[in-house]
Image (tube, coloured by chain):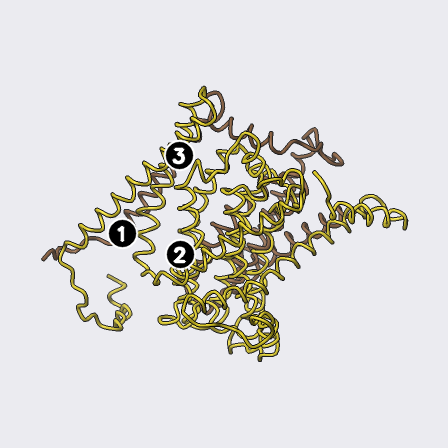
Chain colours: A brown, B yellow
Amino acid sequence: MDPIQIVFLIGAALVLISALMVVTRSNLIHAALFLIVTLFGVAMIFVLLEAFYWAVIQVVVYIGAIAILIIMAIMVTRDVTGEEIKSFNKNLVWAGLLAVMVIVTLVWSLTFWPQFGAETHQAVDSQAVISDLGEQFFSAEGYLIPSIVASILLLAALIAAIKIAFPIKQEEED
Amino acid sequence: MGFDPVQIVAEWLRNLLLGWGASDLLTEVVLKFIGAFLVATVVMLVFIVLTWVERKGAARFQDRIGPNRVGPYGLIQPIADALKMLTKEDTRPQGADVVSYVLAPIIAVFSVLMAWAVIPFTETWIGADLSVGVLYIAAVGSFGIVSVMMAGWSSNNKYSLIGAFRGVAQLISYEVPLFLSLLVPVFLARSMGVNSIVQAQGEGGVWFFLMAPLAVVIYFVSSLAEVGRAPFDLLEAESEIVAGYHVEYSGIKFGLFQAAEFLHSFTFAALMAILFFGGWRGPWADQYMLLGLVYFFIKTSIFYLLIIWSRLTFPRVRIDQLMNLNWKFMVPVSLVLLMGMPLIDYATRLSDNWVRVVAQLVFNLVLGVVAFSMAARADRQQNKRERVVFEGRPVAVMPKPPATEDETAA
């Protein structure tokens, strides 16, 4: 077993175990912290695939922003000492069945992918990949219009969130 | 290129391991581990020196002498400090969340040490020349926020939690202008690799502070806030919330937090040297590689002293001033800067190199003057309005009584 495989196994085990912890912990903040471990493990797998850009984006966006947001939301809305919640209810069986079905479908459809089971991928020029990505985002033939539409959607959501969250002005101008 | 001791030692070790019958891959892994260990150790050793610099510097600024008993000029003082830290009682608050409580200082140091993997000490001394180096530095920095959050929450202390909330609000806010100003050298060098940015400031190029002085100012101020030191030390404001998120930490755990803070400042100083001031570049650094190391540390030390200087000079800002400075001044200015510089670059694409540099410089200076005068005018107008300095607020507000049965029904 070469070192890359060992690192892969560690990363995969990290992802699986911590993902299991996320759904089974009864303390919400512990669950959120385990989510960070899961996301970090996914970033590790990206590094092994030599997709450095995606690994770094994974950490910036998911750990730096979304996981922090989740923890903040939990702390603001709940008892910060970490109230115990029930992780399981009677829908466990059906949810488990659904999850197994999704995994089976995913793996089954992946077997049709030509590169399924390939040993390793070709080393790529990561600088060229990033430049290509940037050009695709900013060229009219590429994804300029979709990215502008997505930005406008996000901007609208941002403004709407501020409008909803802003306290209604009191009529007490002295 | 010249004499490169690291390369020689690495070659010798590689041949030794291969001679012992280790496989190519294993040799590579062992060498990488040794390299990572060395970088981390050197950075931690720098922390020991930094504590002396900080104490001595603060003393001189405050017209004191500072540590002067242990060794010449108190040079052995850091070792005494470290021993004191190690031998202090390691307390743990009741009701603390043990795993998070112990992990938080470790993650704090980890987030700083990770950044040094991509920092080029010299032309060839770089842990990993990632093509996304600048983004990587931003990414590992976000673990610092996680550690603040974990420390504040797990200590089971109200002051810690308030400090953590403040800290997260401040760190997330100031990440925006920090990243935007980091994008300026990325744009000028046309690369996100840290070493390529240094390369771009060499042959044919100028040090980027000449092309983007405004970006340097924005970077410096937001990195001060990102480190959480005075004048932006709201997350550990002693007079308000005791010590913020690390109030419950003692002994070596507190030491780790302190190491993280000092090294964070040092890392930002190093980044400033690399991104805007040519990193290891300097006279004859191309011929004699070790000279590059000297230049790099000289530049970094100058910026580190600048950070200490601003820490000891400016009073702490209030939370509303902090947020106003960020969202109403630095973010808009850095956005305009980031949109204007490519336009200038495109307009002068056919001109000589020095014309392009001067055009960027003029654009930066004009934008800076306009932005600062607008901010100053807004500030004067606000001061003109009648302001009540203190109107006797109640210290604590009674919470609303919980909704009764029939209220929730209605």
Q: What residue did someone put label 2 on?
A: B169
| B248 over A69 or under it: above or below | below
Q: Say whether residue B191 is left or right of residue B231.
A: right
Marks 3/2: CA distance? 33 Å
Q: What residue did someone put label 1 on?
A: A166
Residue at (27%, 63%) from the top-left corner?
B408
Q: Nearer the viewer, mark 1 or mark 3?
A: 3
Label 1: chain? A
Q: Nearer the viewer, mark 2 or mark 1?
A: 2
Q: Nearer the viewer, residue B145 or B357?
A: B357
The answer to which of marks 3 and 2 sits earlier in the sequence is 2
Identified by mark 2, the residue type is: Ala
Residue at (49%, 52%) from the top-left corner?
B303
Q: What residue did someone put label 3 on?
A: B361
Q: Is residue A28 visible?
A: no
- Residue B229 pos. (x, y %): 43, 61
Residue at (51%, 77%) from the top-left corner?
B93
Quarter holding the N terminus of chain B?
top right
Residues at discs 1 and 3 both on one chain: no
